[in-house]
Image (cartoon, coloured by chain):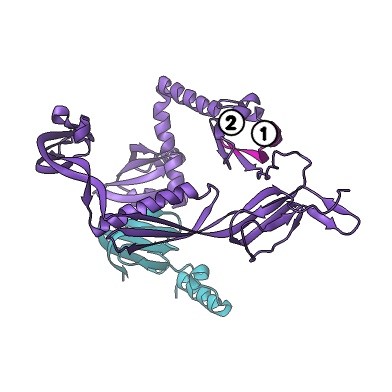
Amino acid sequence: MSNKKRKIRLGRRVAEALDLPAEAVSGMPKLTLQGREAMLVENHKGLFECGENIVRLHTACGILRITGEGLTLLELSAERLYVAGKLCGAEYEP
Amino acid sequence: MLTGIWNSVAGYVIIEIKGKGLERFLNLAVHSGIEIWRVRRTGVATVTARVSVEGFYALRTLVRGQNVHVRILEKRGFIMRLSRLRFRKVLLYGWAIVLALLVAASRRIWFIEVEGCDTVREAEVLAALDTMEVRIGSRRNAVPTSQLGGELMASDPRIAWAGARLDGVTLRVSLQEAEAIPQLPSGGQKTPVSIYAAKDGVITSITVYDGKAKVHVGDAVLAGQELITGVLRSDETHTLLTQARGEVMATVLYRFQATVGPTITKPVETGETRICARIGLFGWEFLSNGFAAEDAWENAREEPTAKYALTNCFLPFTAERIRLYELAEREASATQDELAQAALRKAERVMSETLPENARILSKESETVWLEDGALQASILVTTEENIGEIKEIKEPHGEQD
């Protein structure tokens, strides 16, 4: 087991024990979908690809792929990313 | 939302970032604390984004060695618009002058509103204020609002209370007028008097300034009955008399009757007719041939025979062809409605001549009755509330005055 995964599991256990939100302790991404028009990604690790139909992000769980049409990054900061457009899907790349 | 408002005030720039490592450059920028928003891919190696002015200067230092090129597409925001105006000195001076004029104008009084005027006319109050150097255009800080009320009260005995306050550039003056105290008869200032009922009625309120009330609210009184007496004390040895003063309000019932018919004088067509045209423009109407100016045709009955209107045009224009029927006042038989209206008008005329000015009408009912000769009698029943007090000298002396 890699050091990174061990860290995530430890963080998750601590969060469960202390009844804290998991994303606050383990650094796992938190995705909030607003209808089909926008998605807020918190705890991302950086932008990997930014296109009109695809946005790929580094996260603690791997690369997150958001697909859609006319995608725009309404907000881009070190921890938050707010994508707007006509969203089609979000999935982790294998 | 607040961030958006702040950015549109403080200003921001729309930039185009061109190069190979766009995502890497964006990550570097956001980790350096530069706020970037509305990032959109516009080409294979191009994105557009928005950054604050400070963010743009910080980006320029990051560009070195990143193999990207950043350029400004557009500058937006209030500050940016202002900065464009910095070379238009006349405009800036104009705004400065307007601002200075506004500030200067806001230090003076431009409106004076007087409320509570009834017997005291507004023009009299304004004239009184004018003598106190308070007028439109006076400086606001030169107006002693705390003293104005007292000075107004001193200037006119009809003003019981006055107050003034400044509301922006408006000076609001509020008045409370003094109630008129009943005047004594001209017989002499020291003649003892009482107040008697001038009419039959039912007392609704009684206010005694001097003397002693002899009736109470709800009492039915007859004309001539003593309401407020000037006899304060009367026994075998001493009688104390005074000049009774007060206000006695009572409900009074009136009945007004008028009879008309069976014929009445009314406008009747004489058989004379004339054709004329009427032209209307901007709301003004003109009759052709000046028929309306002739007395005989002034109240003629009109019957339009043709009409043309041009209202969609920017000049609202109408033209009418009218037949005028001459009318003359003659004795003629009348319909039931005409007789009723004439009888009621006559009764109303009698009523308006009879009712005192200070009477407040509480209720009014009317009815019409046919008489045997074909005439019609109209009756109006009016209930009013009015001051029925009448000052008279005391009728029966109660001995010698102390």
| Residue B23 position (above or below residue B180) | below
Q: Which residue is mark 1?
A: B156
Q: How many numbered markers are drawn?
A: 2
In this rendered view, identify the residue nearer to me: B46 or A81: A81
What residue lies at 37% left-to-right and 43% top-to-bottom?
Answer: B66
Circles 1 and 2 on the same chain: yes
Q: Which residues are magenta?
A: B149-173
Q: Nearer the viewer, residue A37 or B221?
A: B221
Q: Which residue is mark 2?
A: B124
Residues marked 1 and 2 touching at CB (< 8 Å): yes
Q: Is residue B302 left or right of residue A6?
A: left
Please give the chain letter of the residue carrying mark 1: B
> Tag 2 or tag 1, which sits nearer the N-term?
2
Q: Could you say which quadrant of the image residue B288 lies in? A: top left
Mark 2: few, some, or many residues within 10 Å (few <14, many ≥20)?
few
Say if residue B180 shows up in the picture: yes
Helix or strand or loop: what does disc 2 sit on?
helix
Q: Residue B194, percent across and down?
A: 72, 51
Chain letter, colour purple in render: B
Q: Nearer the viewer, residue A45 or A33?
A: A33
Magenta region includes residue B392: no
Q: Position of residue B385 (x, y in %)?
A: 56, 57
**Residue at (34, 39) in percent of width and height:** B70
Residue B384 shown left or right of residue B26 in the figure: right
